[in-house]
Image (tube, grey):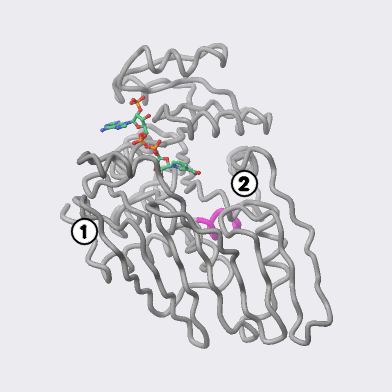
Amino acid sequence: MINLGIIGTNWITDQFVQAAHQTGSYQLAAVYSRRLETAQKFGENYGDVEYATDLVTFFAIQHVDTVYIASPNSLHFEQAKQAILAGKNIIVEKPAFSTPQEMDEIIELANQQRVFFFEAARNIHEQAFKTIADFLPLKDQTIGADFSFMKYSSRYDQVLDGEEPNIFSPHFSGGALVDLGVYPIYAALAWFGMPNESLYFAKKIQTDVDGIGTGILRYEEFDVTIRTGKISDSYQPAEIFLSNGTLVLDAIHSIDEAVFHDRDHQRKIKLSVQRVENPMVEEAAAFAEVILNPTDRTLGTNYEEWVELARNVNQVLYDMRKSAGIVFDADEK
Ligand SMILES: NC(=O)c1ccc[n+]([C@@H]2O[C@H](COP(=O)([O-])OP(=O)(O)OC[C@H]3O[C@@H](n4cnc5c(N)ncnc54)[C@H](OP(=O)(O)O)[C@@H]3O)[C@@H](O)[C@H]2O)c1
């Protein structure tokens, strides 16, 4: 059983803890919050839970072996570092870190301390995602792809009222690309590999981060278009253009339907994919398998691939952000 500690008490942590419990492999053991009442309210339905309002006390709780970090993006790095130095595995919400330097430092530290680092990029752990990976032909038959993830954020209303919520703040490494664009980028890199060039054209909002934008990932033989935004909604499906037809997915961040239409319009192949109710169960189960079987070679290889993918996604996010002139406080560290 994995004894889980959590940082961040918003709805996403609740969803993760429920998913983790659903796998049968985790038990919530400790909650950190800046306020004791918030921590206690979060943990009250999970049995025997310890609470902490400072991180030194929290990381000193011996029986916690794994910490899930879902704080504002710019805080992940320091919290992850402290957790690793305390000997804990870390599951860090996407986008795990703000810069390639931060990412490299954490990967190295986790290796040194012999603990696991997972980025909670839930879409790549979904069964649907793997079904599509198996269906896709060799890369030389790919002509292009078009992926969108855009969802209006109610927190943009606060921006319009003159406020700067964390998710739209450059101090907290926010903005549409890193928040939602990370899903299509994960999909592109997992299915097609690392692009040769990554560009982003964005409309900045009052807080100086991107509200909406279009990215292009340039591969040797084709391009992938990424559209993302938090100040509008998109209802566009995702499409992968192949030399013998087009694969249409209902969405890129959570796939519920995948249909291949062949070139001469004679045939449609419906892939067997299904979304699970809590979208975090599959990633929680995948992480647990690695944590609970640390010497398993196949799982170890999977883990190394996830880490390299996280590193590459982080680099692409950084390159795209730079190309659009989006600067975070974390860039200056
Ligand atoms: N995988 C997904 O589907 C998904 C969905 C949503 C969010 N996320 C990710 O989850 C993370 C958190 O996102 P969020 O929207 O929940 O962020 P948030 O509301 O800004 O903050 C999350 C938690 O961090 C703590 N916090 C807030 N402001 C803080 C500050 N100034 N200093 C220190 N702690 C602070 C709060 O917990 P306390 O008050 O208890 O200290 C809060 O509950 C992000 O990395 C985001 O990308 C992932």
Residue 303, magenta (yes or no): yes
Question: Residue placed at 37% from the left, 58% from the top?
Answer: 177
Which disc is residue 151 wearing? none
What segment carries the magenta color?
300-306
Residue tagged 1: 327
- Estimate how packed mark 2 is, as few (under 14), some (14 to 19) or many (20 or more) residues with alpha carbons within 10 Å: few
From the top left corner, tell me how far across and down residue 330 is, in percent: 22, 51
Position above or below: 142 against 102 = below
Residue tagged 2: 295
Secondary structure predominantly adopted by residues drawn in magenta? helix
Residue 76 visible (yes or no): no
* SS at circle 2: loop
From the top left corner, tell me how far across and down residue 46 is, in percent: 56, 16
For ligand 1, the image quadrant comes to top left
Question: Mark 2 or 1, which is nearer the eye?
Answer: 1
- Estimate how packed mark 1 is, as few (under 14), some (14 to 19) or many (20 or more) residues with alpha carbons within 10 Å: some
Residue in the foreground of this view, choosing between 44 and 59: 44
**Of the residues under marks 2 and 1, which one precedes in the sequence?**
2
Q: CA distance from mark 2 to mark 1?
A: 41 Å
* SS at circle 1: loop
From the top left corner, tell me how far across and down residue 50 is, in percent: 45, 14
